[in-house]
Structures are given as C-alpha cells and as structure tokens.
Image (cartoon, rainbow, N blue to C red):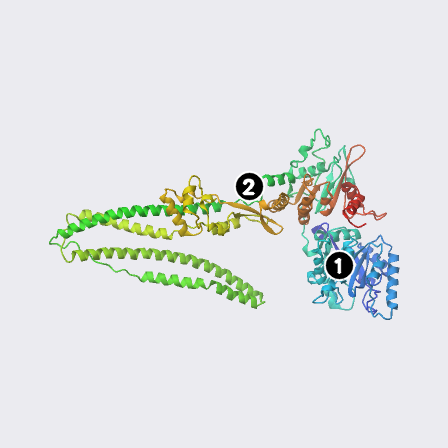
Amino acid sequence: MNEELRKKYPGWYRVDLHSHTTNEILVDRKERKNKYSHEAFYKYILEQNVDLKVVTNHNTLNLCDHIKQALICDKANIKYLCGVELDLCFYSKRFHGVVILSPEIDIVKYSRDLEAIVSNKIKDTKASKILLNEEDFSKLHENTSFIFIPHAIKVNGIFYEKNPRDNDAKTIDWVLNSIRSGMSAPILFENTHDYNKYSLINKIKQYQNDKSVNFQVGCIVNSDYNFDSDEEREKNIKQKAKYCIFSIPTYRGLEIAIRNFNTRLSCEEDIVSIQKYIKEIEFNDIDNISFKIGGKIFLSTGLNVIIGNSGTGKTLLLNEIFRFINKKDISNSIEKKSLNHGMYYNKTHDNILSLPDIENIKAIEIPKIYEKILKCSNSENIGEQFGVTDMSVSTEIINDYKKCISKYEILKKQTLEDSKNGNLLVTNIIKNTDFIINNRTISSIYNLICESYNSNSKERCARKKEEIRQILSKEISVKIYFGKIVSLTENTEIKEAVTTILKEYDKVIINLKKELKDVEVNLKFMDINERLFQIVNLAIKKQIDSLGEREKNFKKRKAQKAEDDYELSKVIISNIKATLRKDIIYCGYPYEKLCENIEKNNANKYARLTIKNPKEDMRDMDLASSDYINNNNIKGALRSIGNVDMLDSSSMKSLDDKLLENNISLSEIIEAKIPLVLEIKDDGEWKKTNNINPGSLAKRFMEYFFTKIIDEQQPDVIFIDQPENDVDKTFITESLSEFIRKNKTTKQFIITTHDPIIAVNSDANLIIKASLDDNNKINYSSFLMEDIDENDYSFRGTDIVSKTLDGGKENVKLRYQIYGGGL
C-alpha cells in the first residue's frame, strides 16, 4: 500500500494471493498461451500496489520461475510467498485447491514430490485429465505446513451443480478433516463479492451447525490473474476490489489473519479509517524503570494487551497512559495497590512517559466488571440497570384515567342532585300554572307557541358518519390491493411508490378515525338539542291543551314563574347533558395504550418492561387480589361484587356505581403504579428475570453495559485493567472477548491481563511485555502476535505470550490432551 493509504488505514496491508504466470501444467495437458514476461509481472505488481504477493500456477512448483518472481517482488519491496493451484479429485468429485506454502518447509523436496506425482498422472494413458486424488494430496503434504484453500468458482468446483445431492457432503470430507485437525484454515478465492451464493461456503456453514465440529471460515477475493490474451477479462480483474490483512505481510501474518478473519481480513473499501488513537508511547529517562526499543513503543489501532507477572508494572503503565490523557488515575485500580508502601513504591512518576499527537482523543475506562455484575445481581430495580425505567408517560396515562373515572363519578352525583332540584321546580311550575288557570284576566298576556326542530344538520352529520365508516371498512381490502401490486412486480420504483402510498394512506385512516370521533360527539349534542326541543314542545302542548283559548291572569305570579322557568330550563338541560356525557366517557382500563407506551419507551435489544398481567387476565380480574386496585380495608366489598372485565367501559361504570353505593370512589382506589415485569432476551427468547439463571442474567447485563458505553460516550480509546478478576471463563469468552473483538476494528483498546482468552482468543494486535530485571527495574517491550524468529522460524510472538500467560505451550498441549484432544 502506498503511504497515503497506510496513513488512512494504519496497520492494514494490501495482499494479492492468487495469480498465474507461466510454465503451468493444465488439467487437460494443454499449454496455456499467455503474454507473461518478467517486465509485465513487475508492472502488474506495482499497479496492484500490494505488500504481499503469492503466485499459484497450476499443478507445478517451478522453482526457477518462483525464484525469478521472488527477486522481482524483492526489487519492488514486496513480500513473496510460494504457492500452487492443484487440480484435485476427492471421492470422485473434481475441484481446485490452492496451497500457500510455509517458508520453513523444504520447497525443493515439495517441488520434486509434486513433479513426480504429476509425471505419473501424465504417463497414465488411460486418464485424460491430470487430477490428484486424496491419497496423492495427503502424501504430498505429509509433515508440511501450508494454508489450504478450496477454490469453488469454476465448472469443476466442488458444488457447481444447482441441486447438489445429499451424498455430496462426502466430496469435502477430506477438506473438512484437515480443517478439524487444525492443520489449515479455509479461505475461499472467488471473482465476486457475493461469495455466499456458492454452495461450498454454505456447506461449510452447515458443518458449523454441527456441535461436534468447531471451525471458522474466512474468505478473501483475489485476482486470479494469469496474463492471458483476454483483454476484457484482464480489465475486469484489475478493477476488482482490493483485499487487505491486518497483520504483517508474511506467511505467519497471513495465518494469524486467517484464523481471525472477522477482524483481520477485509475488502479495502470496507476498512474503517481510524485517525484518533494513541500512536506511540514515548518513555522518559527514569532511574528505576528501563525501556527497550529506544524508549518508544508504537501502538496498534486495535487491541493492545499489557502482560507480565504480578508486580511487574502492568497496571502502572496502564494508569500512566490514562493519567496523561485524562489528568486522573484509573478508578478502583491504582489507588488500591498501596503505591506508597507496596510493590510500586518509588516507581510512580508524573513524567514517566509522554504521548505525542493525542489532541482531542477521548479515552474512557471500563470500571470493575465484577462490581457491576454484583450490582446487577443484587439490585431490586434491575430494570434501572438495563436502562428501562422511563415510566413518566405511563404515569400520565394512569392519572388521566383516574381523572376520567373521577369525572364520571362527578357527573353521576351531579345528575342525581339535578334530578332532585328539577322535580322541586317542576312542582312549583305546576302550582303557578294551576293558579293562572283559575285566575283569568281580560288581557291575553300568556301565549304559548310550539316551535319545530330543524333536523337537516343532524341528518347531514349522520350521513357523514356512515360514509366515513364505509371508507374505514375498506382499509384491509385497500392494503391487500396494494400488497398484490407489490407481489406482482419487481420494479423498485413501483414498490417504493406503493410504500409511500400506504404510509400516506395510514395517515389518512388515522385522521378519518379522529374525524369519526368528532362527528359522533357532534351527533350526541345534536341529540341533546333535539330532545330539548321535544321536552319544551311537549310541555307547551300540554299547557295549551289545558288552557285552551282562555285568558289568564299572570300578573301576581309573573316574577316567581319567570324565575322558576329559567331555573328549570337550566336544570333540565344540565341533567340531560350530564346523562349523555356519562355515556360518552370511556371508563375501560387503558391497557392497550399502556402496552404501546411501555414497549416504545422501555425496551432495547437486551431488556424490556411489560405489564404483569396478560390481556385475558384483565378481562376477568379478581379485584380483591388485584395489583391494579388498592384493596386495603375494602376486600369484603370487592368480593361481593365479584370478578370484573377491566377493559370494558360499561363493566367499569357498573363497578363504580356499586362502589359509590358503599361510599367508595373507584378513582381514589385505582393504583397509580402499573404492575410490571422485566424480561431479558436470552438465547433469542424473551424471558422473565426469575426464569433466567444469575450467570446468564449477568452476561446479558454486561453486553448491555458494554454497548451503552460505546453508544453514549463514543470513545476513541478504551482502558481495562485486569477485567478477568473475579469473573468466570465463560463470561470472559462469551461477553468480554466478544465485546473486544466486535469493537476493536473501530476503537483502540489498551488492556492489562493475566488471561490468555483476552490476549489470544480476543486477537491481540500488539503485546506489551512488562518484566523485572535482576535489579528490580521494570522493563517494557512490545511485539506482534505474528512475530517470528528469523534464525529458526520459531513463533517468537506466541511463544512469549504462551510462556507468560499459560506457563508455556506444553501446558496448553497437556490440558488439551487431558480434555480428549488429539496428539
């Protein structure tokens, strides 16, 4: 990669692992005609701008050609690896397999063994193809370190058929056995981004579902460039996406990248550019601390792990880096290690190090994990730990409901009072009218006339109500109609247009439902007015019938009667309106509204609050034992009423009427607090917390806790000090390590640990080793996991880690064998 790309993607190296040159032995024994030349090869690798190059010609390892290509790559300052693409036939099934050879093997011997096998195939006059079977392949690679790559893009790929047979699994048994034994990891080379559509990858994924098989699959797409005469193919190949590894461009680096493909293999266009991270640690000259590598350590953008024995200064270094950025110590860490009297006595300094170029870098620490888990396990309000406690809107809904019930009760009491007063006033009117009848005068002073009620507005309103209902009744059929349109077309514009129409149609339906409610209310009040006309006209008609055409003497009773008439009209109107309003008020418990609100405001992908009782329980609620009613001191009265449908308005009104007869107000005994339960998502299912074991609950909580830190604080660098303390290995593997792997491609981690799961299984990009010399002086040095010793090709990086964290590889080997592993 050029310097511009390296600055943009620090730590990443571009690779080209699959191209052809010349002197190939094709499966059909034909000679490939191409335009290869050393000059063309040199020009090609410069155009590719790669850091690691592998040439894999068909069925031959021509050492002279590989030496020439290696020299050309060396001239271009590119690492070179030797490989070969073999035409294979395992269990009567043909496919290509790419082999990348380790530099430590005897390539001369490998070349001769391959030449001997291929020569025998060529001499076999009965065979029309040069195909190596599983025995040939096994013999060729005995005691050989290599990376094996099933190649499944051509007509003779392993599962090229559109409908593979059930027994096709046998054709890749050898491949899968080699994967199981740990001798290789598969990479799929293809000429397309959509590698999942090939059945080989799908078949391997099927094996991944088999609990007895535990391996992972990495995929890299490369050029398959062969300098042929197809200019269009050459043009397309050169335009393919470029692929990179987050490892040093060596065989060991490639192997480490393959085994950690999720974080170390990527298409260049998918790499996240990381600019804000701690690039290096520059140590100052301190008497009791010594440093290697010239007093400077360069950090990785990913996972940096500080390892070492107890008391060697791991936490000291972590804290000094954190303090340089945030001007404070890591909480619960340094201050508890007795700096003034313990192992760090006289080893702490404000100027132990400096960090260049850290302006605007946000660094945070992950607090003590065990304390967080304890807080989750012991907390009464565990919902608060999962961030699902927002009940403000729900409380408003309950308070509004209590006000609604209270309004119903007030109107009911007012109706009874108005009826009593109205009866008294009607009696006074009758007395006054009787007096008028018996005391006629010459003057005609009291003329009663009936008025007719204009019902046009009411009829229009009723028609509007019916028309809206007819439109709403067609909602489902309209959506089905547009759904059929979507199912019958592949046109994206049509689907998007239909989606837009349906969204707008949903808005129209919502507004029409609101309009319908308004129309229904208007109709109610029109009913009131019409009934008022009827009542008044009936009264006038009765009076006219009683009085006839006789003249009445009204002077003595005029003032009293006018007052009585006015008061009576007010009482009658108020009484009718109150009665109708009682019918309009909806008194059913707002269960659906509460559910919608709680699901909206109190749920995330880890936890959610739900109402304790399912809907069917609400329809047959025992009030004497209900959490929705404050039944203190009134259980006897509630038992006499029996079970109630709390979701039905008339049922709740009937309940309120019965309670009022016993001087009990329903609005006052409704509980303001909603009975809730917390559910956690465990293994893809929502489970109540009392049905989840403490370990799973803690795991879910820490996943939420880690995600919350990233989402809320948006850090550039994350510090963690010995997170394995007091927690089990399962938690480290399933929660902590997963969190690190998931985020280390976008966040820089600096961690101290004694646990190999964090350093090795979490795929550390850089190791910082802390140690003490004979003079009790601290030494800090750094290295990569893929570092090797150039003298004997031993795995220097992993050797140091295994010795420090596992007591050596022999300990791991012995433990593996005791567990039942292979030799």
| Residue 453 makes an appearance in the image | yes
| Residue 368 makes an appearance in the image | no
Q: Which quadrant holds residue 244? A: bottom right
Q: Nearer the viewer, residue 414 or 345?
A: 414
Q: Residue at x 80, y 32 (%)?
A: 775
Q: Nearer the viewer, residue 20 or 696?
A: 696
Kind of residue at disc 2: Asn
**x and y, in percent, of residue 75 in the image:** 82, 55
Would you say the residues marked 1 and 2 are in contact, meaning their CB atoms lie under 8 Å apart?
no
**x and y, in percent, of residue 66 in the image:** 84, 59
**x and y, in percent, of residue 236 in the image:** 72, 65
Residue marked by disc 2: 381
Q: Nearer the viewer, residue 635 or 337?
A: 635
Q: Tag 2's secondary structure?
A: loop
Category of crowding for the residue at label 1, using alpha-carbon neighbours closer than 10 angstroms: few (below 14), some (14–19), many (at least 20): some
Residue marked by disc 1: 48
Q: Which quadrant holds residue 19? A: bottom right
Which quarter of the figure is the N terminus placed in? bottom right
Q: Residue at x 87, y 71 (%)?
A: 125
- Which of the marked residues, 1 or 2, is nearer the chain's N terminus? 1
Q: Which quadrant holds residue 720? A: top right
